[in-house]
Each structure stands twice: as structure tokens, then as C-alpha cells.
Image (spheres, helix red, strand yellow):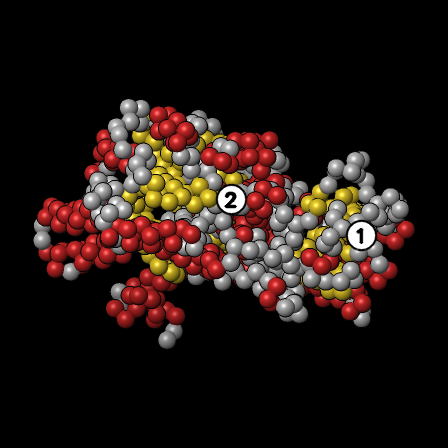
Amino acid sequence: MPLMAIVSRLRRGDLFFSRLRRQLAAAVAVCPFTSSAAHDAGTGVSGPHLPVLIVGAGPVGLVLSMLLTKFGIKCAVLEKSLSFSRHPQAHFINNRSMEIFRKLDGLAEEIESSQPPVDLWRKFIYCTSLSGSILGSVDHMQPEDFEKVNSPVCVAHLSQYKLVNLLLKKLEKLGMHVYRHDPSDDWEPDSPLEKRILVGHECTSIQSTNEGVIVTARVHNGTTLEERRLHCSILIASDGARSTIRRLVGVEMKGERGLQELISVHFMSMDLGNFLLKNRPGMLFFVFNQDAIGVLVAHHLEQGEFVLQIPYYPPQQNYQDFSPQACEKIISKLVGWALQDVQVLDIKPWVMHAEVAEKYLTCNNRVILVGDAAHRFPPAGGFGMNTGIQDVHNIAWKIFYFLKEVASSSVLQTYESERRPIAISNTNLSVENFKAAMSVPSALGLDPTVANSVHRAINTGLGSIIPKNMQKAVLEGIFSIGRAQLSDYVLNEKNPVGVMRLEKLKRIFAEGKSLQLQFPAHDLGFCYTEGALVADTSENTQNCNRAGSGRVSREYIPTGRPGSRLPHMHVKPFTAASTEETLSTLDLVSGDKPEFLLIIAPLKASYHMARVILTKAEELRVLLKVCIVWPHCSCQSRSTGSRAELEPWKNYIDVEECKKDRSWWDMCCLTNKGVLLVRPDEHIAWRTESDRVADAVSEAEKVLSRVLGL
Ligand SMILES: Cc1cc2nc3c(=O)[nH]c(=O)nc-3n(C[C@H](O)[C@H](O)[C@H](O)COP(=O)(O)OP(=O)(O)OC[C@H]3O[C@@H](n4cnc5c(N)ncnc54)[C@H](O)[C@@H]3O)c2cc1C
């Protein structure tokens, strides 16, 4: 059919075409790939072209802006709110995120000094009220967590908004400022946008061009509303779980929706903080009693800062039912007495999903989804923000090499092939962990799946035809019958049903079948199987972490397998002034520039390989440093290190293993002829043994081309 005929049938509103018309309209609005340059007259674009525009100043968008700014990539952030959220959602920062934060100008150290002492948050406590009987408690820290065997840094517990504040301070030091639009300022079309966090700027539409993306933002400052159009080469969607950009580009989420609805109550109470500090310090308190059920998150006991999560069943229950006074009453029922100093700060409904975006890149790789915009998990296990932080750590160096025209755009696509499987695996793990959390109420005779089925039946079945207030009464009646299972009459050592349930509970805790907090095999052991790397199938997979293996194993097994994070081991630089001065192998990878690291042993063939790779990297404009790992106690006898072998290059470092008992090469499942190429995100891109390489020049070319998608 000729094009004009199609267009005229579309205009006539032909039913046959109505769906197609909607799809076309969406495609044209979002990704027309027309030849219109953004600088053309009529586009209304303000400001010069930005290499990267980040939409959403949550933790994920801010971490990316920091990484890019450190790498010298110009970027700006748009944030729809005028102020940063104070609702403390995330609080558990896992090992891998802390390792990333160590490289962000001392952020990890500041988190460590701002968080409460670990003994105050290492436990989950299950009880009938915060002052009543303890049904069980689980300690989530193990000695190896403090010994820094697997990582140079420990997990942490800090409220998301406090982390965001620390990030903003770090960004300020890098020259990145929060900017609020003042209508009396004239918008100079050429005023630079980079290094600005533009608050009160809501992205409302996007349009793809040959050179990138034009973003329309609704700009408000509390009193006025204007529109602004900005042009960038790469648009990052870090705009959270209800991402506008994801909707605009028509990317679907895949997975399970609406696992549970909850009301989140952020409140302060020094009385409660002091009571728990003295009697039962912990991070999470699962409270089950006849009057109320809830999970209390102790964000900071010493500051009396808490968030209470209460199950919520709309539409029979309304958000308005949870007024500050109603929430105070629920808090009292869970505490066991009426607190006098509760100050409710914020009340928010939210829905738990387990979904991953079907695509992470769209519009010709110009629009990239990260963080909650790309995946949303149950918070069980604290994987949401952590996965987002690791997403942007993965994409930052790829953006650098793409924008510098060193790598092809296919390097950006490896972000999806690497990170999407990790999000799927973390989603599955979070769902399993969420189900494990439900095993405790189930053992107490309170099956949450029954509550959800009853709720569904009322919403969709015969129940839906009865009046709303009656539906509410029925639901609450059923729930209070359920909660009667938690009465002292049932739950006591003299009641055979109670004895059986308490025994079952003990078994769940003893066998580690309740909600867990730490998953080192996933946290540190996740491994990319395809992407910007040269896959190596030679290793015995028994010796590898398998990110898909669920909650079965806590153990992290270090490996040098391509795709894995570089193992941590303490090493001592030859230049160290004292015997105490050691580094983690992770510190050998720069945090300030997107530099690759080649690790070799001081052997002739390995030096040859290093010289060839240094030459090739220089030719391709790839930043690369070489690290030579010497056996324990080599430092004094070989004080000149690798100078004779590697001159005139200066970008190398000689280090020696700190321990005699385990060699670096054993840890990486290699002999000392090993050669490891590590990416700027500390993941291994390639490994070999120097005597296995027949032609070093063609091997170096093959490897670097593969990693950069050339
Ligand atoms: C109760 C709870 C507990 C949690 N606990 C943990 C935990 O312990 N550990 C963990 O890792 N994760 C946890 N999470 C998950 C974590 O909170 C999220 O994964 C995290 O907030 C995601 O960060 P983000 O930057 O991707 O998105 P967000 O934090 O949602 O930030 C998105 C930003 O984009 C802005 N925005 C949205 N739309 C636009 C637009 N159109 N234009 C401009 N700006 C826009 C928003 O205002 C917001 O500031 C928890 C979540 C919940 C609900």
C-alpha cells in the first residue's frame, strides 16, 4: 500500500489501523530518528549539547554523576522534586557497593563513621511486641565479616537519605552544584549545564535525534512553571521504579507485580530507641500480636529513628485510614505501651513488585535504564539500591570509552547483557528471601498467602458486589480471627498447638530458613557470562559462584574467571614506607580514571605479554596500568622491581603478596604464568597463561577489540 494511502487511512481513523496509529504515534514521539539536529532552529533546545543527561537524583543517578565527573565526562542531573526525599527507604549497603564507595573519595569511610555501631544492627528479632516475648532472634554477622577476608570493607547500615546527603557533599567538592531555577534569571541558551543537579526539573517527554536525545523538562520552583528543552548524547533513566522515561520509550517490565502492598511510616521516638538499645538492639523487628502486625526497621536506635511497615489492603483500607494518629495507635500496639514522644514524619503507601525491564537500552543505545527504572525487587535482602549502584559502576567506563570514540556503541549494549541477568538473579533471590520471611508468620498459624487470597477473593469474586464498608468489615473480621492465633492462650508452652508452632519456629531459625541479610556468593560472587569480556570455560565450574543458585550457599569463592569481580587479597607495594602499608588488590584499579589493569607475575613471557598489551592499548587510546605480583618477601631482594623489563613505561606497580599461605595465582585458579586483564569496574575481562599464547600481538589485538566491541 502506498505510504500516502496508509497515512490517509490513519487520518480517517480506520479501525484496522487504529492500534498501529497509536504505536506509530508513540514511536514518532519517542524515537523518530529524523535528521533534525538539535541545534536546528525551531527545536527550542536551551544550553549546549551535553554528553550525558541523568534523569533522577536518587542514589543511583547521583553515584553515576560522580563516576562520570571523576572520569571527566560532562553531565547534568534533572530531579523533579525541589528537595531530596527524606523517606529512609534503603539502609543496608552490601559489600560490593561499599567497595565501589571506597573509591568515591572516601565515601565508604564516611558511611562507616555515620552509621550506628554494628552491634546495634546485626540482629533480626521476632517478638510478640517490642517489649513482649522474643520468639527468636537471628544474628547476621559472622566472624569472617569483620576479618576482611573476602573484601577490604564490611557491609553497612545507613538510611538512604543520609547516603544521598553524603553523596551531594562529595559532588559539591567535585564542583557539581544543586541548582534551583529562578525565573528572574534569563536562560542564556549557551549557559553551561554540566555539573548541575537541576532540581524542580521533571522530564516529561523525549525525542531521539541523529546526535542523541532532546529532553523536555517541566521546570518549577514552587511558584512558576516553565518548559525547557535540553539536548544530550546519552540519556540515563535513573528515575526510579515508576520511571517516566521507561514509559515514554515503551519498555515493559517482566515478572510478578503486586506481591504485597504496605504502608511505610517514618517516625522518631527517643523513648523507643533508648528502650531497644538497652533491652534488645537490632535492625529489623518482626512483631506479631493479636492487635497488630508489623515490621519495624530501626534506622538509628541512638537517634530514635524508625520506619514501620504495615500490611495494607486497598481498596477496603484507604490511605486516609493511616493518619498520623492512627499510625501512633498501631505503633503503641506493637510496642506494648503508649509511647509519649512519637513524632510521625511521613506516611507512604508502596507496592512490592519483582520485575525486570525487558530491555535496558533503547533509541539506538541512546537511552539507558539504570537502578529501579530497570528493576524493582522486594526489599528482602536489600538488593534494590545495591544492584542499581553496581549497574552504574558497570556502565560508567563504557560511556567514557564510547564518548571518546575508543569503543563502539556495542560496548554500551554489553551493559544489558551483563547486568540484566544479574537483576533477574537478584529478583529471584529477593522473592525467595521474601517467601522465607513469610515462613515465620506461617509457622505461627498466620499464613500471609491466605490473607492475600481472601483479599483477592473480596476484590474480584462474589465479595466485590457487597458494599465497600461491609467488605472492609469482613476483611478486618477475617484478619482479627487470624491474629487470634497469636493470643497468649494459643502461643504458650501448655497449649499443644502453641508448643508445636514454637518448635517449628525454632527449627526455622536454627536451619537459617528465615529472612537472611547477607549473601556473599551473590554480593561478591556475581559473574558476567557474556559481555565486554573474553569468556573462559576452562575453569572447573565447581569452583565458581553461581549467581542463579538461590539462597543455598552463603559462601563466596574467589576466582579469576572472566566476568568475576577481581578477588581481594592484601599486597604490599615495593614503594611502601612501612611493613604495615598494604593495599587490597582492588585498590590497584584506579577509582579516578577508567583505567584497565593487567596483572602478571615477574616472568619473561609475562613481561613480553605486558609490553605488547601496553603498546596496543596506547595505540587504541585505552588507559592501562600493569601490576606485577611478586611472591611473599621479594620486596627487599628485588628492590628495582620491573624497571629493567618495562621501561620506558612508567604506569606499572610492583607489589608482593602479604601472606605465605595462599598465593595470588592459586586464588585466581591460575599458575604463576597467569595474565589477568581487569576492567575499570574491577571485573576480569580476560585471563590466560603467558606460555599458552602463541602470538602475543594478535592475541592483544583480539582481546582489546573484543572488550571494546571494535
Ligand atoms: C521499604 C524499602 C526498603 C528498602 N531497603 C533497601 C535496602 O536496605 N538496600 C537496598 O539496596 N535497597 C533497598 N530498597 C530499594 C531502594 O530504596 C531503591 O532500590 C532505590 O531507591 C533505587 O534508587 P534509584 O536512584 O534507582 O531510584 P529512586 O531512589 O527512586 O530515585 C529516583 C529519582 O528520580 C526522580 N524522578 C522520578 N521521575 C522523574 C522525572 N520524570 N524527572 C526527573 N526526576 C524524576 C525522583 O524524584 C527520585 O528522586 C528498599 C526499598 C524500600 C521500599
Q: Residues within 10 Å of mark 1 (few under 14, many from 20)?
A: many
The image position of residue 310, as x and y in percent, is 29, 42
Task: Please give the name of the residue rendered at 36% of the width and 63% of the height, measured from the top-left corner.
Answer: 23
Task: Please give the name of the residue rendered at 74% of the width and 48% of the height, measured from the top-left corner.
Answer: 659
Q: Amino acid at mark 1?
A: Pro
Report the quarter where the N terminus lies. bottom left
- Considering every residue shown, the one lying at the far front of the view is 494
Residue 252 is marked as: none
- What residue is disc 1 on? 631
Q: Is residue 82 left or right of residue 701?
A: left
Q: Amino acid at mark 2?
A: Met
The image position of residue 30, as x and y in percent, is 42, 55
| Label 1 residue SS | loop
User: Which comes before the other along the chain, label 2 or label 1?
Assistant: 2
Choose between 282 and 679: the one closer to the eye.
282
The image position of residue 65, as x and y in percent, is 55, 42
Q: Is residue 21 above or below residue 78?
A: below
Q: Is residue 350 above or below residue 25?
A: above
| Label 2 residue SS | loop
- What residue is disc 2 on? 141
